[in-house]
């Protein structure tokens, strides 16, 4: 039987990648990794502070370094930031060893879910209209999330426990299928 793959949760900021990922890791008996948290620890600054003081290129370079390190670890559940999939240097290290799960949400719901936490999101914090900024992100990123995804899970009208159960079921089924092909 081949090794299980990493499970990488992608989607808009505020969709719940971290909250879903923690429980998913527990249910799959895998370590949960919040990629942005690892990057923050390496800089000893928040993502917003990293963007402000070092710029996005330094953030993306560190994102790639952390992704490279994760590629050599046992299968984990990974929650990257919303832009990770657009960093080819970062994705090159993990895509071949991963299942990409797109947690889909409407831009409006994503903003509502973030609440006051929107101030910690560099791409949204300075926007005059966070809803429009999120709609713009959705238009720019949505098609790429869909193309890259091994599984798309709509999170709009279902509870988090349903989302988690659906992902667990489908990941385990894919792993059984993969093992059957060996």
Image (tube, rainbow, N blue to C red):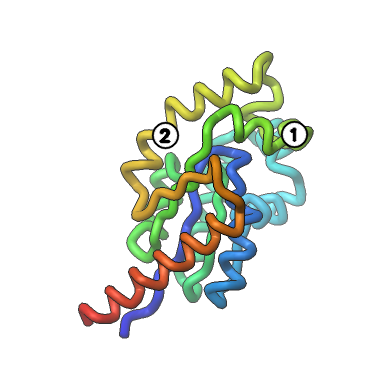
Q: Nearer the viewer, residue 63 or 37?
A: 37
The vertical placement of 66 against 55, above or below, is: below
Q: Measured from the top left, where is residue 165 in percent x and y?
A: 52, 63
Using residue 92 as the reference point, say whether residue 110 is left or right of it.
Answer: right
Q: Nearer the viewer, residue 40 or 53?
A: 40
Q: Who's the residue at 61% across and 35% down the image?
A: 110
Farthest residue in the top direction? 128
Give the labeled residue for mark 2. Answer: 142
The vertical placement of 156 against 124, above or below, is: below
Q: Who's the residue at 41% across and 72% down the image?
A: 172
Precedes in sequence: disc 2 or disc 1: 1
Residues under numbered marks 2 and 1 in contact, where contact means CB atoms less than 8 Å apart: no
Quadrant of res 37: bottom right
Q: Measured from the top left, where is residue 50 in percent x and y?
A: 69, 39
Q: Who's the residue at 34% across and 47% down the image?
A: 148
- Residue 66 visible, this angle: no
- Residue 141 visible, this angle: yes
Give the labeled residue for mark 1. Answer: 115
């Amino acid at each position: 039987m081949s090794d299980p793959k990493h499970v990488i949760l992608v989607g808009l900021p505020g969709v719940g990648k971290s909250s879903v990922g923690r429980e998913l890791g527990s249910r799959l008996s895998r370590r949960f990794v919040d990629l942005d948290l690892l990057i923050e620890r390496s800089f000893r600054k928040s993502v917003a502070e990293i963007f402000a003081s070092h710029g996005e290129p330094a953030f993306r370079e560190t994102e790639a370094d952390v992704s490279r390190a994760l590629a050599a670890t046992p299968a984990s559940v990974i929650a990257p930031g919303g832009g990770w999939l657009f960093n080819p240097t970062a994705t090159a290290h993990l895509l071949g060893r991963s299942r990409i799960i797109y947690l889909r949400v409407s831009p409006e719901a994503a903003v509502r879910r973030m609440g006051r936490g929107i101030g910690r999101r560099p791409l949204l914090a300075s926007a005059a209209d966070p809803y429009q900024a999120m709609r713009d992100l959705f238009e720019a990123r949505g098609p790429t999330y869909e193309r890259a995804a091994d599984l798309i899970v709509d999170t709009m009208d279902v509870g988090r426990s349903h989302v988690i159960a659906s992902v667990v079921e489908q990941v385990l089924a894919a792993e059984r299928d993969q093992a059957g092909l060996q």
